Image (cartoon, rainbow, N blue to C red):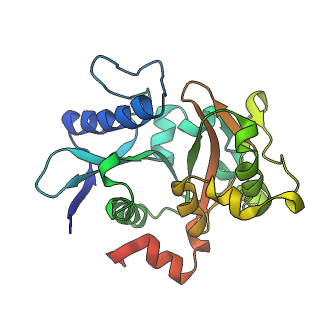
Amino acid sequence: MTEFTVKLAETDAELQAAQRLRYDVFVKELGGSGDLVDHPAGLERDRFDPYFDHLILTEKGRAEVVGVYRLLRGSQAQAAGGFYSEGEYDLTPLKNSGKEVLELGRSCLHRDFRGGMAMHWLWRGLADYVTQHRIEVLFGVASFHGTDIAQLAAPLSLLHHRHLAAPELRVRAREASFQSMDLIPQEALDRRAAMVQVPSLIKAYLRLGGCVGEGAFVDHSFNTTDVCLVLDTAQMNARQAKIYGGATS
């Protein structure tokens, strides 16, 4: 069985290894782009990278980064001039909640390590980070591939009807780019078929008790349709907490 090492990137070389994996996934696979993407060097990066902590996953004994998460606490966001998600969502409910929040982003795995234990190892590392910093709420944008809302109407409607965040944590897509997710009436929705279209990462957050904000954001530069996921760690039941924390409890 493959063993992994999870740690925070500490050097420029480790950060660039994370950005190289992000380029392979978000740019080469999914067709994304951005002002600071370095195509000649094969690096996906943006202005927020210097402020995030970058959780990296490697095979034990090897240097290649095969998984990554980037993590931004409230104090880091202040230094960055805001959270990354604030470009898409009004985060006022979270920022006024009085809770310690952590923004998650750029989660991805090398194609050879999907569907196995790699994501579990990344989450174990994330759980340790959450415990260390006493995080109470996790949030961040997660993406559907593509920008054709008609094709995504069923899964977006499912999230709206079944997994909408409570009012006190319900962030909302900014009005200038607000895309309603209430597209198909609940009684007309084939829930099973709709759930098949939900990306595996979003399903995983839902299993942990996660919920979504109001409205979606269509990101044409990244060729994605984004939803904002919110997870109050205090709301997880014992079984979900065990899955989330892995062997760290």
Displayed quadrant of residue 9:
top left
The image shows residue 154 at horizontal and vertical percentages of 75, 50
- Please state, as top left, top right, bottom left or bottom right, where the C terminus lies in the image: bottom left
Task: Return the x and y of residue 77 as percentages of the image width and height.
Answer: 50, 40
Q: Specify whether residue 43 is in view.
A: yes
In the picture, the quarter occupied by the N terminus is bottom left
Which residue is depicted at the point 58% across and 80% down?
237
Q: In this view, does 20 lie above or below 191?
A: above
- Image height of 23 relative to 125, above or below: above
The answer to which of 14 and 77 lies nearer the viewer is 14
Residue 101 appears in the picture as rendered: no
Does residue 14 sit above or below 210 in this rendering? above
Q: Where is residue 108 in the image (x, y as percent from the top left)?
A: 40, 46
- The residue lying toward the viewer, choosing from 94 and 18, is 18
**Which residue occupies the extreme bottom position in the image?**
238
User: In the image, is residue 168 above or below residue 79?
Assistant: below
Which residue is painted at 70% across and 59% down in the image? 193
- Residue at 88% across / 54% down in the picture? 185
- Front in this rendered view, residue 249 or 92: 249
Res 83 quadrant in image: top right
Q: Position of residue 129 (x, y in %)?
A: 37, 60
Indicate left or right for 155 with 18 as reference.
Answer: right
Position of 117 with respect to 177 (left or right) is left
| Residue 95 appears left or right of 242 | right
